[in-house]
Image (cartoon, rainbow, N blue to C red):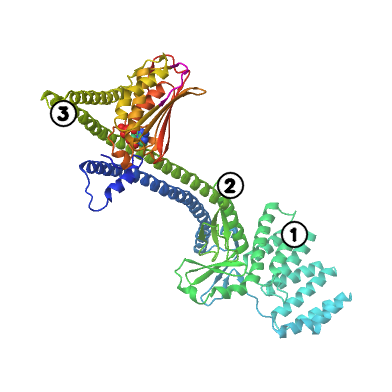
């Protein structure tokens, strides 16, 4: 027998069964139920709880995985872009190193097409072990103060003044005097140059030309104080004079002059060589084929630029420590040192140190260009160039240092839209979490519904078992009574006629009870199968009620209860099945007699209402608790109240009442006051279904 309320869920029931008070043993039915609840709980955990946990876990892991994938996709893209930028940058230096090395080994002058070595190259120098520059320029020799005095005083100075005052003949004589008094070849050569110039001015071109020839022969390799080679000046002036006479003589001489200048090593800080070369080229312009002028002009320009940078950059040579640590570097290997405006690339080959000054600004421009090309506008990331001065940025994903060339500089990868990336990660996460939460909630809801369903089925199964037991129990008592009374009569134990009549009456009473019980069970079975049919027809409901009450009266009154019937005269006709309505009333009156015995009164009232006719069956018995009230019409439902449990019953009486009332399209209502009594109300409408009604399972 199930002693718990059928409303309690499976889980609650399980707890109740597992933790019952000490000293109360479990019945075998409870044990069976306990086991089946346990089995259900096990199945539930195995097939629903654990899988849903796994699904949630997988979902959350998937979300994290998705985020990681998105991030690593970006990281992968940025690594790829950084690598490719770095490779391009590196290749600039690799090609520089290779070309520079080859050209050094070929002993080709670095002044020859310097941009072939690198587009960043400003100057290349060759130094010896002691750090002295040996290529491609010479350093100027110091002019002594003694030398300077010669040019600032004495006949040389006087000649200068005479020329300024227009006394040209005097000036010529004075320059000759200066030449005679000179303390060395350079002073003499310089004085003679001036004399030759003035001779040409005074109309003695031929003499002047001859003097220039002598000067070239005797003093040609000397440099006068302004940095001009005396030979260059003499050749230029003589060629100018020759040009006046005949171009055929002057042009080869001019070409020869510029070629000699280009073939020689220039002196740092002395602009004489390029100045004369440019002047000669101006003279040649238009007199010789343009190509020969252009190629010479380019060479002069490149070399002048190198000379200009040499003047600025040679002081920086200190930086590269030519005499010290660089010796350790393996031959042909390049080292890089940052200067103010240049990066010095240095390498030892043989006995010499080769130093290349590379333009930092041009390199930076190239780096920026590479970064710009590496930032695909349709990709997720862009490449920036960072230097020690760049402020740090949190949105940078990864770096690639530009070592060893640009120490402190890096290519940095940054998402084009860092906010957008974070946003899309957030959005994806939210959607996934929503899906996970929804599915877990759906699973939980499904599990809850399943538990309810299973728990109901279990309750119903328990109720059915209890119903079978109750029916057998209820059958036994009338059968026993009938058998006892019949045996007494048979054995002649009832001696008086009155006794015999009592026995007959008891047999009839018990058979009626028996047949009511059997009717109920059979009707219930028919209703459950869906085969029960009611024959609704216009009939006198007052008649139906009074007949039934009279049938029940003796059995009720024999229990000491008063049965009151209140039946008006002029009740309307209501379509109903009199046998079925009688069964409804019998069930209600039987209940009233059982549960209302303490009140010793049962009232039956019939009256017309707006919609039809209402029958009320009231008692003053134990009443029904509000907890039981909503369930008493359910099949097999029996209250747990011990006062109700005291009476035998099957739990189908009121279920049949409800079925029959449904078949009449009527209503069965109940109101109860626990301890004070109960009132059942049956409302029959005027217009019930016309066809033969079926007992419908609710
Ligand atoms: P049973 O065979 O148990 O009487 P019923 O379906 O007729 O089955 O009734 C269901 C339950 O409703 C009963 O077990 C009882 O607890 C309660 N009940 C029915 N009628 C009354 C009443 N008149 N007074 C108090 N309780 C009642």
Q: Which residue is mark 3?
A: 484
State which quarter of the image contains the C terminus: top left
Residue, disc 1: 282
Q: Characterize the magenta stretch by its predominant secondary structure.
A: loop
The N terminus sits in image quarter: top left
Q: Residues within 10 Å of mark 3 (few under 14, many from 20)?
A: some
**Of the image marks 3 and 2, the number of the one nearer the N terminus:** 2
Contact flag, marks 3 and 2 (Cβ < 8 Å)? no
Q: Nearer the viewer, mark 3 or mark 2?
A: 3
Rendered view: 292 above or below 439? below
Dot 1, crowdedness within 10 Å: few (<14), some or many (≥20)?
few
Q: Is disc 3 placed on a helix, strand or loop?
A: helix
Q: Is residue 398 above or below residue 388?
A: above
Mark 2 surroundings: few (<14), some (14-19) or many (≥20) residues within 10 A: few
The answer to if 569 sits in the magenta stretch is yes
Element type where label 1 sits in the image: helix
Q: Nearer the viewer, mark 1 or mark 3?
A: 3
Taking the image as shown, residue 661 lies to the left or right of residue 254, namely left
* Residue 384 on the magenta span: no
Residue 10 shown left or right of residue 419 in the figure: left
Please provide percent x and percent y for residue 283: 75, 59
Magenta residues?
565-574
The numbered mark, 1 or 3, whose residue comes first in the sequence reads 1
Q: Is residue 529 left or right of residue 90?
A: left
| Element type at mark 2 | loop
The answer to whether residue 336 of the structure is visible from this angle is yes
The quadrant of the picture showing ligand 1 is top left
Mark before the other along the chain sequence, 2 or 1: 1
Q: Which residue is mark 2?
A: 377
Is residue 632 visible in the rendered image? The answer is: no
Closest to the observer, 270 or 12: 12
Q: Where does the image place residue 458, in percent across and percent down from the top left?
A: 30, 37
């Amino acid at each position: 027998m199930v002693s718990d309320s059928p409303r309690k869920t499976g889980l609650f029931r399980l707890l109740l069964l597992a933790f019952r008070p000490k000293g109360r043993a479990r019945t075998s039915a409870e044990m069976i139920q306990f086991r089946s609840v346990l089995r259900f709980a096990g199945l539930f955990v195995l097939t629903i709880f654990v899988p849903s946990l796994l699904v949630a876990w997988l979902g959350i892991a998937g979300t994290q995985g998705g985020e990681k994938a998105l991030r690593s996709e970006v990281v992968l893209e940025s690594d790829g872009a950084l690598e490719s930028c770095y490779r391009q940058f590196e290749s600039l230096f690799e090609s520089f190193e290779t070309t520079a090395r080859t050209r050094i080994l070929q002993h080709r002058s670095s002044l020859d097409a310097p941009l072939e070595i690198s587009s960043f190259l400003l100057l290349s120098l060759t130094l010896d072990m002691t750090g002295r520059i040996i290529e491609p320029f010479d350093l100027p020799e110091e002019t002594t103060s003694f030398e300077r005095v010669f040019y600032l005083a004495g006949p040389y100075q006087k000649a200068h003044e005479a020329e300024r005052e227009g006394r040209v003949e005097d000036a010529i004589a004075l320059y000759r005097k200066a030449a005679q008094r000179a303390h060395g070849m350079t002073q003499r050569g310089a004085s003679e140059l001036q004399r030759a110039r003035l001779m040409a001015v005074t109309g003695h071109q031929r003499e002047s030309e001859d003097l220039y020839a002598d000067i070239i022969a005797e003093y040609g390799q000397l440099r006068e104080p302004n940095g001009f080679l005396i030979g260059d000046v003499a050749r230029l002036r003589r060629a100018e004079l020759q040009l006046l006479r005949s171009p055929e003589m002057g042009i080869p001489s001019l070409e020869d002059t510029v070629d000699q200048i280009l073939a020689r090593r220039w002196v740092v800080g002395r602009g004489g060589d390029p100045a004369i070369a440019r002047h000669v080229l101006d003279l040649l312009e238009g007199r010789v084929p343009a190509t020969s002028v252009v190629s010479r002009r380019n060479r002069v320009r490149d070399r002048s630029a190198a000379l200009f940078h040499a003047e600025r950059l040679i002081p920086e040579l200190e930086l590269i420590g030519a005499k010290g640590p660089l010796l350790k570097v393996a031959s042909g290997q390049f080292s890089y040192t940052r200067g103010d405006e240049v990066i010095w690339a240095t390498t030892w080959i043989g006995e010499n140190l080769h130093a290349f000054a590379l333009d930092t600004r041009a390199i930076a421009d190239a780096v920026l260009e590479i970064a710009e090309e590496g930032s695909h506008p349709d990709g997720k990331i862009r490449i920036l160039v960072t230097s020690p001065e760049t402020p740090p940025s949190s949105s940078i994903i990864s770096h690639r240092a530009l070592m060893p060339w640009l120490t402190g500089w890096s290519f940095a990868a940054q998402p084009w839209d860092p906010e957008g990336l974070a946003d899309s990660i957030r959005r994806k996460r939210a959607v996934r979490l929503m899906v996970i939460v929804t599915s877990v909630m759906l699973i939980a809801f499904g599990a809850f519904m399943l538990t309810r369903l299973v728990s109901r089925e279990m309750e119903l199964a328990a109720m059915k078992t209890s119903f079978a037991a109750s029916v057998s129990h209820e059958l036994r008592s009338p059968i026993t009574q009938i058998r006892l009374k019949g045996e007494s009569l048979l054995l002649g134990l009832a001696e008086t006629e009155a006794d015999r009549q009592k026995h007959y009456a008891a047999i009839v009473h018990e058979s009626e009870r028996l047949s009511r019980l059997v009717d109920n069970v059979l009707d219930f079975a028919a209703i459950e199968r869906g085969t029960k049919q009611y024959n609704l027809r216009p009939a006198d409901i007052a008649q139906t009620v009074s007949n039934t009450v009279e049938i029940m009266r003796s059995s009720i009154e024999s229990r000491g209860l008063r049965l009151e019937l209140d039946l008006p005269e002029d009740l309307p006709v209501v379509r109903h099945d009199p046998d079925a309505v009688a069964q409804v009333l019998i069930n209600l009156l039987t209940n009233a007699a059982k549960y209302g015995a303490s009140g010793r009164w049962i009232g039956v009232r019939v009256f017309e209402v707006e919609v039809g006719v209402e029958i009320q069956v009231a008692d003053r018995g134990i009443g029904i608790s509000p907890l039981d009230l909503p369930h008493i019409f359910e099949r097999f439902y029996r209250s747990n109240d011990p006062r109700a449990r005291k009476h035998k019953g099957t739990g189908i009486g009121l279920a049949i009442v409800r079925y029959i009332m449904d078949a009449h399209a009527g209503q069965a209502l109940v109101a109860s006051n626990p301890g004070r009594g109960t009132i059942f109300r049956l409302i029959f409408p005027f217009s019930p279904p016309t066809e033969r009604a079926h007992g419908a399972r609710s």
